[in-house]
Amino acid sequence: MRPSLRPLLLLIASLFVATSGYCASTLPRHLPANVAYDFCDLMVLYNGRICPLHTLAHDFTLKLTGSSSYRGLTAEQVFTGWIFNFSSWRREKMIKIKGDAARRALGIDGNRASLADFFDPMGNYLLKNPPRELRDADEKFHIFEMLYAGRLLKIFPLRDDQGGVMWYSAGDNLPLATHDDKWIFVKKSLDYAHELVATRNYDALSAMLLKIGKFQQAEAAGVMPSKFRIEVENFYNRFHSTTLFFAVAMTVGLLLLIITLWFQARGRELPPTASLIMLASCAMALAYLAMLFAMRWIIGGHIPLSSGFDTLLFMALLIALASVALHRRYKPLLPLGLLLCGMVMMAAHIGEKSPQITPLMPVLNSPLLSIHVAVIMMAYALFALIMLNSAAALVMHHCSRSSSRWVTQSALVGRIALYPAVFLLTAGIFIGAVWANVSWGRYWGWDPKEVWALITMLIYATALHSRSLRCFGRPVVFHRFATLAFLSVLFTYFGVNYFMGGLHSYGAA
């Protein structure tokens, strides 16, 4: 190496080391990843069910930051950082603030705020009685309030005289009959853990966590989730990614659809290799969605059909299943199905960025609900496939003169699929009426979701009367109708919840 270059390279290297050290030092104090992970192996009563603290840490970090990690720290490190190093984290600008009104109210530049930003110099809270546009920021602040009031860290189970188990935090008032040694353990365990964290005695902390774990197992024997269920939940928290799935599914589905339309426009058959790639892609999507659905079923302990995320996941699963099952009769179903799966999961991701697996409300704990939602979502899945099939046919009609045969064939497929779709929607409305009578004592209450489901059924039913309404006998007219009619499905599923509310606003179909 030339001597003249050595000082320059040494300067660059020293600057890099100094900068790296500075960046690392700006991180708030936090536990090592393995210690934070061990802490979150403890069980907690969260959202009405017993689950690993990993789930609470994941929801906590995702809700506040918009991501399941923060600046290279895991969700467990962020969560335990706030528990054990509050003073180091309170000025960390990690809270994602949506909307200009909330940013102005907090007096921040950019879209990130610290906990300290929620108070004025006199210590007064800035978002008292917030209007609607500030409620998201107010809700995030109250997560910290719940954490430090002890309502989030109910990690100590105590069995009463009747054999029931109640979960407490260290700050809760314990029953008067609590034995002295248990009272001391519940009240002092986390204080001792704070001392161990402050002195960085992580070996002793691990031993303390083992004692709390054994205490949980002894006091909550018979009600603790199985080891298998805990492992499934931890795997779900760490490895599932709807973002990656919908991005890949939409990209691959769109590319395969373009290839399919290109060959169809030239009157040529797809090469066997392309057909095999399409089938493999859709089969992998089906396997992933089925695994996701099964994991949420195992974790929640009930069929996951009660939230918006769950029903959209089920809809995507049905679309993938129908595409794989029927692709021999109609080849374009595979790319159409894959593209639509990606779109549905994107809507699920946007609509519920932090899906929480919670127990069912009593009114939803009915087999009729599962049947009602499943049948409705089957109908919606078919309507979505019909819409995308018609949209592709319209593109072909306007872009290729030799596409009339394919447009006609697509219309025939759409009409055939329309019969079971309308039947399923009608059956789903009927089953929903029976469930409403069981739950609320009336079959029909003119709830906005009920009304729009009926409107959607009537809209699609008109296309079944092609003998009376001869315009629907023309393929292009049918395709235009099927494309526009899907707006009614979208409004029934999404629009009613956002603009009208009602009894169905919890998210199920």
Image (tube, helix red, strand yellow):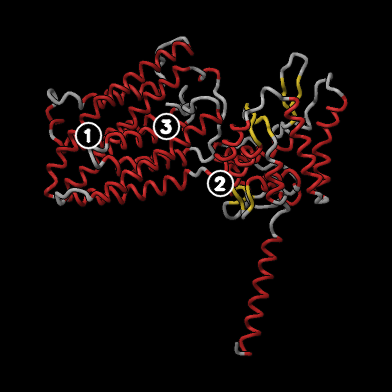
Residue 4 position (above or below residue 287): below
259 displayed left or right of 113: left
Residue 371 position (above or below residue 20): above
The secondary element bearing badge 2 is classed as loop
The secondary element bearing badge 3 is classed as helix
Residue reaching furthest bottom? Answer: 3
Q: Are marks 2 and 1 in contact (CB under 8 Å)?
A: no
| Amino acid at pointer 3 | Phe
The percent position of residue 162, horizontal first and vertical second, equals 74, 13
Residue 411 position (above or below residue 19): above
Res. 417 visible in picture: yes
Q: Residue at x 71, y 18 (%)?
A: 164
| Eye-nearest disc, 3 or 2 | 3
Residue identifier under label 1: 481
Of mark 2 and mark 1, the one earlier in the sequence is 2
Disc number placed over residue 314 in the picture, else none: 3
**Quarter holding the N terminus?**
bottom right
Judge the density around disc 2: few (<14), some (14-19), many (≥20) Cα neighbours within 10 Å.
some
Residue identifier under label 2: 66
Toward the viewer: 335 or 25? Answer: 335
The percent position of residue 255, horizontal first and vertical second, equals 31, 51
The percent position of residue 462, horizontal first and vertical second, equals 21, 25
Of mark 1 and mark 3, the one earlier in the sequence is 3
